[in-house]
Image (spheres, coloured by chain):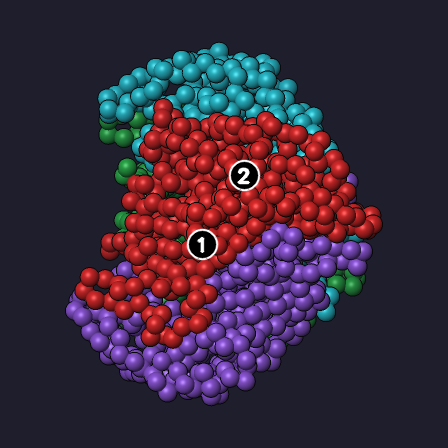
Chain colours: A cyan, B green, C purple, D red
């Protein structure tokens, strides 16, 4: 299932080392100005580069194939294409028959009976570039609703001082290892009323969208896991005539937005590709020890921020369009 | 949106103090023996009762209205009906115009322009009885796949010694307060290959399903938030010829099950209904102080266990049916 | 798949001789006044009775189980229940193992491995009562958009003089046979802009909805099959400043409504249950000759009219809600 | 809504004179051999060319962007790209503000507030090349099930002698007019049991798919509209030990395939683009007379055959995958 959303439907396609990756956005309202230059900056933020990330050099240039007429969205599907350029598939030849620990190699082979071993194929983080491109379109639409999203890394390997992030990552890289971290994304300007009980709850959609990002192993909203240690009298958000007095709820009650800021945190596991020797097996069942070279981010949390923002944007635009369908009801 | 699933579709309906609640299960394979007595024990486990829960007395008797013929599922929709009996709507009259902190009162009114104030209406935890009934059907189907689910409370207000749970809850109740907790659910016997990238990932579906349970504010799988504090060398699950050497992944890699146990934990917030005075406002915007009487569980984590099991079962049966559609492929 | 629609989702359940049939309507906007008395007249029109139909006596009383609060729709699922009363399952015992020609007996058994032989089980026309009940809710919503639907029988066995319909039906019944007919349904007040290319076209949705009614074997819109015999210069609908000069299109161009009347015709096959002897086989493969007694309409076209209206209403309300989601676009 | 299917999901994109058209096929089983050369012949059959069609010269070369690894489908989305080459948008400049009769110009503008006037934009028949490409993939999968589809033109302007088709078309073209026709498509090798009542019926899905092809105004299955003129004793398909004695049903009973051949006929309207003068209005409401030049097929029925085959293949593969999910049930 490669389509997300019910109203703003995004279908992504593509493998890490195939000809191209891309997305088709179906359900974008017409009349919104859109060009490749609206999307490119989002892709640039996700791109490898900088001391904290992988040296794979992808220009990630996006081409809009359809759905835009004379600079405006036409109400028809917007196809976005990103050609893969810096494809060194040979790097992966040695891994053709080996299951890399922490990767989807084993599960993909079990499911499909074959797998594209080149850079993880479809399971590669590269696929998220297509999500980011689609998310950029969502951000344009959300702008019309007055909604914005933003994200940041909260901690790396438990260290929450941003001044020490680079140091933590460098240390891990130096020893051939990698580190996990916590990412936070927020949405401001979200009106009350988005989300639809009981199986279309806004927080459920957010949780599903976030857990669907590779490397994410946990999601919490508002007080999150902290709420499990509180009394009701501490966790409830009281109100006075100016509105809510706190935001332990993280902007969602009963699955519907309250008008407060949406606050989401993600647990990001350490990048599974590490140079340190690991025990594994190959497809014939023989035991192997592998060291994974190639070009990998020692802490994926940083590049995951724009992906999490994109997914939050996709969920919100979906909910906003749904609310337009039903809200402010039908006259009789 | 009141339907979950794509293959095993469950639509629930009903309000806490309306005539009835129920579910329609569409997509259950035919030929499975099923009667009300297969479902009733699941409802009984969810029912109020015992020192840790609310005194509302609902028999929660389920009637199968359709989809079963001579004791076997017929492949047609299975409608499950539970009449509401112990409905003391008068208890809620005083709350008709007041927003209870931590409840969906405010967000529902913003969304729909009106709300059923009696026991929370549709946002009541009572709706989960319908999910549990549908989940019981899912459990029957999963049995045919050799899959089972189970759950338990891991901690209450941070206390993880089960011997102290009752004490914690009693203390909170005594002071008119409530407490949160952590619930864990697991699935055993899950074959490798369930879940479908990139927007139908098994872990994403689980996260969405769990966060869609009222009171849940966080979800984690396997190592979860702990993974954010680890090195890759600690978090990766190596393999030898006997299989995986650990299960930090919680049974899912790349959104696809690995054949290991699925391990999920939920953060459950403290019950928002508390007797302690809280500040709030009414629908006219006037400030109010309220104490919520009525019949409420001081710690909802316990009754949430069968609900979380039901949701996990629903996700798994959906994924198992999907895998049947595509797996072990088409001959040419 | 027992759910229709994407925005106004209707799930029906129930077998002809089971405890009950019903529908859950999910996606009805809130704030619309609704009671059982709004639905009952639609069910009464579909009910058996009168010289042209079957003598099965069902009161078809509908109960609203949820989704309505103090007389107004609450935005939550509206569950509608109709108990089966006049169930003479014994009538069908002789048919337990025989495939009735023209019925779904054979195909259901092939698909499900078992079948409810009592009155056709799920494949019975009785299921359409649930659609009609849901359609009545759709009609309430459409009223708010200024849209209305109506239908009639155009011809019986090729005879298009309504004065001769009763005669045709009586003659068929007298010889133990049945007759087919043509039904037309129309929608007035449909604004331009409903329907969404290329796989959500309004005419495609209508065709699917109509062909999904048992006994319907053909659907045409506007000029329909007649268009296949015309020149473009005859079939095109010109325009002048007052609008369209004709309506060969039947109110839909490119899958989107034009603002003209929607005109749909259905070919209804003769009722397959006939008293005349027919050749068939039983489940053991033995050849049999059967005469089908019981209570059957010799011409199902008449009772199909409210069903076709209901289905048209369901399609239109779905499209109208969709258009609310996207139309009149987002400000920037 | 630009996605068809629930199991074998096809999303098409692209406008007639934009950079490209294409399709993403999601839900294709893995392990099926596939290359561009499997798809190209289907596109070639749909291409303009020959005495009965338009002179627009499109090579319609398809590129597979993803989803195929070393010659086999990988279980991941298969993106198919067809660049538009012979784009003479200037031909359409004169039509920028005029509503062409019989086209979607008026309805698109009403819906979206803007429209791509170049060759009809998204509403162009050119979009069907993407469906045909996706249909070719479906045909590959159906081959594994032993199912094949075929189609032909049955009549042109009521004339059913194929020897006179070219004459009819030439005569219409000579006078600047166009003609309609009837197309028939059939599927052989369909096992009993495909289709799922009551809103996923096979015949309903076929009807929706066919009516969703531009220019189709009517769909009938088996006896179709003819059944409306028959007695039940004539229309029922009896059985003996060798199987069905006739196929008035067209291979579907109760929405489920019977194992007989699927027989579908479509009414195709005359091409709306004609050279003869027509009355219309422009976007400012002024009355206009237009003659439509450019490159158009005087009878679209011929090029519609492979499109109808493609759509039938898409419906059947969807139903076949669904049946794999549920059929031959779960052991207990």
Say if labels 1 and 2 share a chain.
yes
Residue A139 visible in this rendered orientation of the protein: no
Residue nearest the viewer, comparing D258 with C119? D258
Q: Between disc 1 and disc 2, whose residue precedes?
A: 2
Instruction: Give the quadrant of the C terminus of chain D.
Output: bottom left
For mark 2, what is the residue?
D53
Taking D121 as reference, is B319 left or right? left
Q: Position of residue C177 (x, y in %)?
A: 36, 80
Seen from this angle, which residue lies furthest top? A174
Mark 1: secondary structure: loop
Count neighbours of disc 1 (C-alpha within 10 A) and say few if under 14, some if 14 to 19, many if 20 or more: some
Q: Nearer the viewer, mark 1 or mark 2?
A: 1
In the figure, A285 relative to D13: above or below?
Answer: above
Looking at the picture, how far across and down is residue C241, in whole percent? Answer: 81, 56
Q: Which of these two is toward me, B129 or B281? A: B129
Q: Nearer the viewer, residue A294 or A13?
A: A13
Residue at the spot x=55%, y=81% of the render? Answer: C162
In the rendered view, tell whether residue C166 sits above or below residue A35.
Answer: below
Write the residue at 55% across / 14% down.
A57
For label 1, the residue is: D160
- Residue D305 in view of the camera: yes
Pinpoint residue C206: horizontal percent, then vertical percent: 55, 60
The quadrant where residue D72 appears:
top left
Question: Where A74 falls versus B72 (above or below)?
Answer: above
User: Which x, y percent locates residue D322?
Assistant: 37, 50
How far, Cα to Cα, is label 1 from label 2?
Answer: 19 Å
- Which numbered tag is attached to residue A64? none
Tell me the residue at 45%/70% (across/down). D228
Tell me the chain of label 1: D
């Amino acid at each position: 299932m490669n389509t997300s959303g019910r109203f703003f439907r995004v279908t992504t396609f593509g493998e890490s080392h195939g000809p191209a990756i891309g997305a088709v956005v179906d359900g974008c309202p017409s009349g919104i100005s859109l060009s490749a230059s609206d999307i490119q900056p989002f892709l640039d933020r996700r791109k490898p580069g900088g001391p904290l990330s992988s040296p794979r050099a992808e220009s990630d240039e996006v081409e809009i194939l359809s759905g835009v007429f004379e600079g405006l969205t036409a109400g028809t599907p917007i196809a976005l294409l990103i050609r893969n350029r810096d494809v060194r598939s040979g790097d992966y030849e040695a891994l053709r028959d080996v299951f890399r620990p922490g990767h989807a190699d084993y599960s993909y082979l079990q499911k499909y009976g074959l797998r594209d071993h080149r850079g993880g194929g479809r399971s590669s983080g590269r696929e998220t570039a297509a999500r980011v491109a689609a998310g950029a379109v969502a951000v344009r639409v959300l702008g019309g609703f007055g909604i914005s999203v933003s994200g940041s890394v909260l901690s790396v390997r438990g260290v929450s001082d941003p001044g020490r992030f680079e140091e933590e990552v460098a240390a891990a890289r130096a020893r051939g290892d990698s580190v996990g971290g916590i990412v936070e994304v927020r949405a401001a300007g979200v009106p009350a009323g988005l989300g639809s009980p009981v199986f279309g709850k806004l927080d459920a959609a957010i949780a599903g969208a976030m857990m669907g990002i590779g490397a994410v192993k946990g999601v919490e909203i508002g007080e999150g896991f902290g709420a499990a240690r509180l009394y009701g009298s501490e966790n409830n958000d009281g109100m006075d005539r100016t509105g809510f007095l706190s935001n332990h709820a993280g902007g969602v009650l009963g699955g519907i937005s309250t008008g407060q800021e949406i606050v989401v945190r993600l647990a990001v596991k350490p990048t599974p590709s590490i140079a340190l020797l690991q025990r594994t097996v190959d497809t014939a069942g023989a035991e192997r020890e592998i060291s994974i070279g190639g070009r990998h981010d020692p802490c994926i949390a940083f590049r995951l921020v724009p992906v999490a923002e994109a997914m939050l944007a996709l969920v919100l635009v979906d909910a906003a369009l749904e609310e337009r369908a039903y809200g402010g009801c039908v006259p009789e």
